[in-house]
Image (spheres, grey):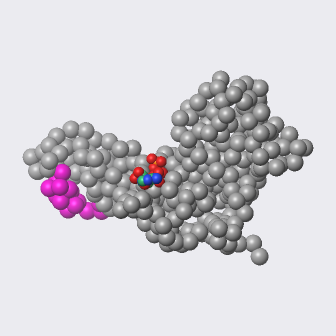
Amino acid sequence: MVNEFIIEAKNLFKSFGDFVAVDNLNLKIKRGEVFGFLGPNGAGKTTSIKMMVGLLRPTGGEILIDGEDIAHADRLKIGICPQDIVLWESLTCKESLKFMGQMYEVPEDILKTRVKNLLEDLILTDKANTMVSNLSGGMKRRLNLAMALIHSPEIVVLDEPSEGLDPQSRRVLWNFIRSLRDNEGKTVILTTHLMDEADGLSDRIAIIDHGKLLRLDTPENLKKEFGEGDIVEIHLADSKMNQEVIFRLKTIENIDSITEVDGKINIKTLNAVGKLPEIMNKVQEMNNEIADLSLHPNTLEDVFIELTGTSLRE
Ligand SMILES: Nc1ncnc2c1ncn2[C@@H]1O[C@H](COP(=O)(O)OP(=O)(O)OP(=O)(O)O)[C@@H](O)[C@H]1O
């Protein structure tokens, strides 16, 4: 019987000396989904995925790949595109892919087609015979990804795939990731600190910070759980009074939540525009002033802020 979950992490734990990088992570990744790890720098995303694909030994816990302990799992099922680019500078794109495919013992005729298709899919056909040393940073990243896919792994792991890519290359990459899932049925696991990437690509998102899993759900459910309303962000002229003002603002009816984020006050509510006069009054009653105010619909980033109390782009 085919296992619904292709990867399971049970009580996964990793410490470096006294420092706990991953703290009892429990999660299951479904076959054929795009699964996003979202968290700020140092949250433990890379450490988690490295353990989940057998690149790093956990301090504790268990990993199952297709129901089988990772120690006995078929590593060829996994393709990893690391954050750091690892390429041979003096080979061409085509040679790099052929060489990698030969190392994986991909049969010659299949390899030829795969090299052609991957170059096409990642918009590198024009650069097939260009030496890696002469590629731009974005092209190197795309080639790096092609290399991770040359043996057609069932599970594709992408560590910060958009890092260093311009918006155009990012779009190519996102479409490609979607096609890996939709057309080839692959399971894609990615780490990102980009909210729009997690939101736009992932079927489910694990939000992690300080090595702990804070939430695991679909982007839609996460946004629903934390409210569909608006966020009013105010910056007080005297931000030392934030806490007192928050206390006062909480007396306004139908406010969902109020949090202090990076010296500003975030107020979540339905019908934010209608609430603005009351918000301003309360601030004035405290002999303070609003130096800056903005209003936007609740986003996944706000969910993150509410869970962690910090903004993701710190
Ligand atoms: N080999 C190591 N030795 C000591 N500490 C480490 C080691 N590898 C990672 N860490 C620490 O573990 C924490 C988690 O690191 P990790 O690379 O998993 O974070 P991340 O969420 O992937 O961050 P980023 O988005 O910056 O890549 C960090 O504080 C990091 O300094």
- State left or right for residue 107 relative to residue 257: right
- Quadrant housing the N terminus: bottom right
- Front in this rendered view, residue 106 or 1: 106
- Quadrant housing the C terminus: top left
**Residue 232, percent across and down?**
32, 48
**Residue 88, percent across and down?**
67, 34
**Residue 174, percent across and down?**
63, 43
Q: Which residues are magenta?
A: 242-255
- Front in this rendered view, residue 193 or 86: 86
- Front in this rendered view, residue 220 or 176: 176
State whether residue 45 is above or below residue 62: above
**Residue 2, percent across and down?**
75, 72
Residue 97: which quarter of the image? top right
Q: Residue 270, can we see it?
A: no
Q: How many marks?
A: 0
Q: Residue 309, can we see it?
A: yes
Residue 93: which quarter of the image? top right
Residue under the point 67% across and 73% down: 67
Residue under the point 68% across and 52% down: 79
